[in-house]
Amino acid sequence: SSGGQEERGGELYEAARKHFEEGDPAAALPAIDRSLASFDSPNSQLLRAHVLRALGRKADAMRAYRATLEGAKRRFLAGEARFEPTVAEAGKWMGVLGAALAEIEITVAGSSPALRVLVNGVDERVERRENGEAVISLWLDPGGVSIDAIDGSTRQSRSVSASAGSSHRAR
């Protein structure tokens, strides 16, 4: 039942929160992931973002805060006022992390649905397609960034040097 899943999710959330508050984010992460698998909630997403940040995984935390902000804002605008603090908290941490990370938007023109984009060797998901272009937005740790777009037998490669707090566009 969905009520049972919500209850189980709440128990796992509390276990994760306890680990986090006791300074053990490594134990909190699997608990919050299990909680979210059982019952997805913006407040659970927020805790997961905090855990990732505490583990030093800033880029992952930024993605988690962005997802939290989007979900909490949607619920708040639908009349669920209890998510207003979640919106504010996620937005605050996006600002803090944004100063420590680099933002990169990658656009690949004329790409097929088979397009693969590797950023520093990691496959990244195409977020959206606009006017025949594939677009990916990422937050990354500062430094050198290698971008490889592979579409069938065609491969395009770019390198970008990204500093903290910067924003880059790669085509």
Image (tube, rainbow, N blue to C red):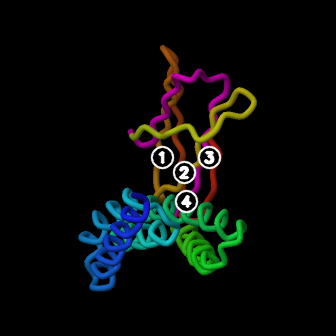
Q: Is residue 66 above or below residue 157?
A: below
Disc 1, SS: strand
Image coordinates for residue 31, horizontal then vertical, percent:
29, 67
Which numbered disc, 1 or 2, marks the residue that appears first in the sequence?
2
Name the spot of residue 13 as percent of width and height, x first: 36, 72
Residue positioned 26% across, 69% down in the render: 26
Of marks 4 and 2, which one's residue comes earlier in the chain?
Answer: 4
Badge 4 vs badge 3, beta-carbon distance below 8 Å: no
Residue 171 in sight from this viewpoint: no
| Callout 3 amino acid | Glu
| Residue visible at 37% across and 71% down in the picture | 51
What residue type is disc 1 on? Val
Does the stretch in magenta take in 107?
A: yes
Q: Which residue is mark 3?
A: 105
Identify the image quadrant of residue 16. bottom left
Q: Which residues are magenta?
A: 101-121
Amino acid identity at mark 2: Leu
Disc ID at residue 145 = 1
Q: Residues within 10 Å of mark 4 (few under 14, many from 20)?
A: some
Q: Which residue is disc 2 drawn over?
A: 138
Instruction: Specify which label sits upstream in the sequence, 4 or 3.
Output: 4
Mark 1 or mark 2, which is nearer to you? 2
Residue at image coords 49%, 25%: 150
Does the CB distance between marks 3 and 1 fall below 8 Å?
Answer: no
Q: Is residue 56 left or right of residue 114?
A: left
Residue 86: image location, x then y, percent = 57, 76
Q: Position of residue 163 (x, y in %)?
A: 54, 60
Classed neighbour count for the residue bearing mark 2: other residues with Cα under 10 Å, few (<14), some (14–19), many (≥20): many
Q: Is residue 117 above or below residue 140?
A: above
Q: Which mark is residue 67?
A: 4
Question: Relative to 19, is 101 on the left or the right?
Answer: right
